[in-house]
Every structure is written in C-alpha cells, then in structure tokens.
Image: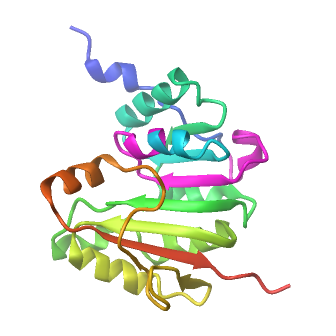
Amino acid sequence: MRDPRAQYANPPRLPEGDEVLLAEFLPGNEPLELEIGPGRGMFILERAVAAPDARLLGMEIKRKWSTIVDERLRAKGFGGRARVVCEDAKDALPRLQPEASVARVFVHFPDPWWKKRHAKRMVLGDKLAEQIVRLLCDGGELYVQTDVMDRAERYESVLVHPLLEAAGDEPGSPLLAANPYGARSNREKRADEDGLPVCRMRYRRRARTP
C-alpha cells in the first residue's frame, strides 16, 4: 500500500544557496508581502484576492500544507505572483536578499505550544525579529496576531526594537481592534466563530539612516 505521505515528498522550496534573490524567485515590481506559517493557506489565498497589486510569499514548515496551498494558488491563477514554499522561516529569512525588499510581514497564531515550558520553541523570537527588520522596507509593516494572551505579551516584548514603531489604533500602541488586510487565517476564522478574543498588533519599520 502506497504511503500517502509520498505525494508530499518533494514540496516547493526556495532555491539552494546562501542567498536567495527575491526578485528572481518571485519576479515583478509589485510590493512583496511575506507570510510566516500560512498553514492551511486561508489567509494567503484570500489576500491574493484582496491585494491584486501585491506579490505574496508564504513559508510553511509542513511539507503537506506547503504543497497543497502552493498548488491551490496556481489552480486559482495566482501562481505568477503568489507562492508557498516548504521552509523554516528561522533558517530561510537570513538567506533572503536584498534587505528593504518586503512591504509587509504577517505572522498569524505562530506558536501552538502555548505552555510556559514551550517558550523556548517560540517562532517569533529575537533572531527572527532582527531578520524581519532587515527585510522590511522603510515604512513596511509587521502584523502579528494570537489568541493566547501570554504569547501576545511575549511578542510585544520581543518587538520593542529601535527600528520598529507601534502602529496600532492609538498612538504609541501596536494594538488593532480589527484585521485591516481583507483576509483571515484559518485559526482567526475559527476564533471569530467561537467568540475568542484575538490580540492583533501592527508595527512599522522606521526609515533607514541615509
């Protein structure tokens, strides 16, 4: 009997090498948006519709979902400007070039291991934040959301960064009452349906020194 996992043995990936030129992997002049951990892909699929003038790149660590979502994007006609690759963002982001080439980074409900003893496994830590800051263009946005309030506090502490400014509803705060991007992740949709509170945070990349 054929192993059903075999169909996901060769998921889409970034090119090999120490550096990956984003403009070569996903050509175009449109603003580039990066989603870390698209999972089952609802957000990137909806975002492709909501933002027709954007290029989209998702990085999903699971081979199954990176394969399925990338195929869905192609089937819907978005493959020329929207891709999902099977990569660990913590390893992949340092390879992406050039800096200041990403307009937005989305991180949705990134840590399913929400107990305190799992804090060391957090996706959004200091090293990943530094890479996000490097890649964001001046004025570029980082959007993070979670329904685990302990995690929200940890993310907020990680994102106290001299090159990031809070860009929420109120001056000096990163908090947003609503998702402004016209697309929801699978987890966000379920949280909304269950009436669970979601913490949404937005930050903006400060201008580089000339």
* Furthest residue toward top: 1
Q: Residue 60 appears at what percent x and percent y?
A: 43, 45
Asked if residue 71 is positioned above or below residue 158 in the image, the reply reads: above
The coloring applied to the image is rainbow
Q: Seen in the image, is 125 located left or right of residue 189?
A: right
Q: Seen in the image, is 206 located left or right of residue 71?
A: right
Q: Is residue 21 magenta?
A: yes
* Residue 82 seen in the figure: yes
* Furthest residue toward right: 210
* Residue 21 seen in the figure: no
Asked if residue 48 is positioned above or below residue 159 in the image, the reply reads: above
Q: Seen in the image, is 120 located left or right of residue 97?
A: left
* Towards the viewer: 92 or 65: 65
Q: Residue 61 appears at what percent x and percent y?
A: 40, 46
Residue at 47 percent of width and 78 percent of height: 126
Q: Is residue 89 magenta?
A: no
The span shown in magenta is 17-45
Q: Residue 161 appears at what percent x and percent y?
A: 54, 87
* Towards the viewer: 166 or 150: 166
Residue at 38 percent of width and 82 percent of height: 156
Residue at 52 percent of width and 80 percent of height: 167
Question: Quadrant of the rendered structure where residue 7 is?
Answer: top left
Q: How many marks?
A: 0
Q: Seen in the image, is 66 located left or right of residue 101?
A: left
